[in-house]
Image: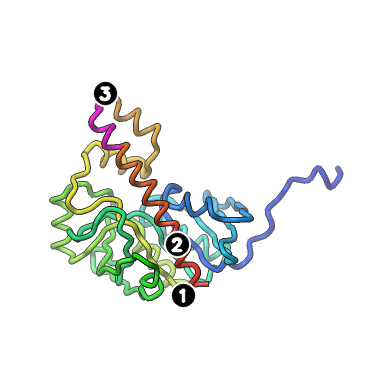
Amino acid sequence: MGSDARPNLAPPPTPADVGVVAAMPMEVGHLVDRLEGVRRYASRGLTVIEGELEGRLLVVVASGVGAAAARRGVEHLIDGHRPRAIVSAGFAGALHPELNRNDLIAPRSVVDGVGGAIELDATAVAAVPTVRVVGRLLLVDRVIGSVAEKARLRAGHAADAIDMETYAAAEAARARRVSFHSLRIVSDDARTELPPEIGRMLNASGSYRVGAALRALVGRPSVVKDFWSLHAHAQEAADRLADAVQVLSRGLA
């Protein structure tokens, strides 16, 4: 068989400047669209996307929802691509009443709610325009849609925001002695009740999959309207998040 018949294989991964870990493809889709010279590596059930952005080599993985998935994603990037820094990027829910949807935030610490706490150096992220440095980011194990439950979490843990991945990602990076940074964008504020149907759907799927969502919400037009609003805001948030990660990467590389 001639050389022309050989499959077009990607070159071996090279050490990256920045590794970006998110839960869902939507959270980093706009960032991936900005990469040049894109290469994809599939291994152990994960797809890592590598490319250049302003002369820096970035590797991006959407590892899945939850702490275990985030930990696995960080370990996968470090083992295969050896980035000099890890950025946990994605959506977060606000607990602080003054945080608004689409606010960019960087926590000073991440906590797991049962005694674990990791202090973060937010200096690099704070240099990104419009980023607000907040106090604690609390790990939760599901989407929290209730205003009352958000208030209880804030009171019980003195936290400003919640998500399902950052603490575990920080823990994994610390164990490997790799610089870690957290950049989140508020997807829902502390004052707005998320319809229970949408909360249940997101907890079941861990995503904003439009087709599946609309099938699940057939016959409930008011909830469908709420979903479309949530989806549109998520797209806008992802675009703003990509802007912030791009600026952050300049200071890390």
Q: Position of residue 131 (x, y in %)?
A: 34, 66
Q: CA distance from mark 2 to mark 3?
A: 39 Å
Q: Position of residue 62 (x, y in %)?
A: 46, 52
Badge 2 element: helix
**Which mark identifies residue 219?**
3
Residue at x-position 37% and y-position 67%: 129
Determine the residue located farthest toward the right in the rendered image.
Answer: 2
**Which mark identifies residue 177?**
1
Q: Say what amino acid the circle numbered 1 marks.
A: Arg
| Front tag of 3 and 1 | 3
Disc 2 target residue: 245
Residue at x-position 38% and y-position 50%: 65
Q: Tag 2 or tag 1, which sits nearer the N-term?
A: 1
Please identify the quadrant where the N terminus is shown.
Answer: top right
Q: Quadrant of residue 186?
A: bottom left
Q: Residues within 10 Å of mark 3 (few under 14, many from 20)?
A: few
Residue 224 covered by magenta stretch: yes
Residue sitting nearer the eye, 124 or 70: 124
Residue at x-position 86% and y-position 44%: 2
Badge 3 element: loop
Q: CA distance from mark 1 to mark 2?
A: 21 Å
Q: CA distance from mark 3 to mark 1?
A: 51 Å
Q: Say what amino acid the circle numbered 3 marks.
A: Gly
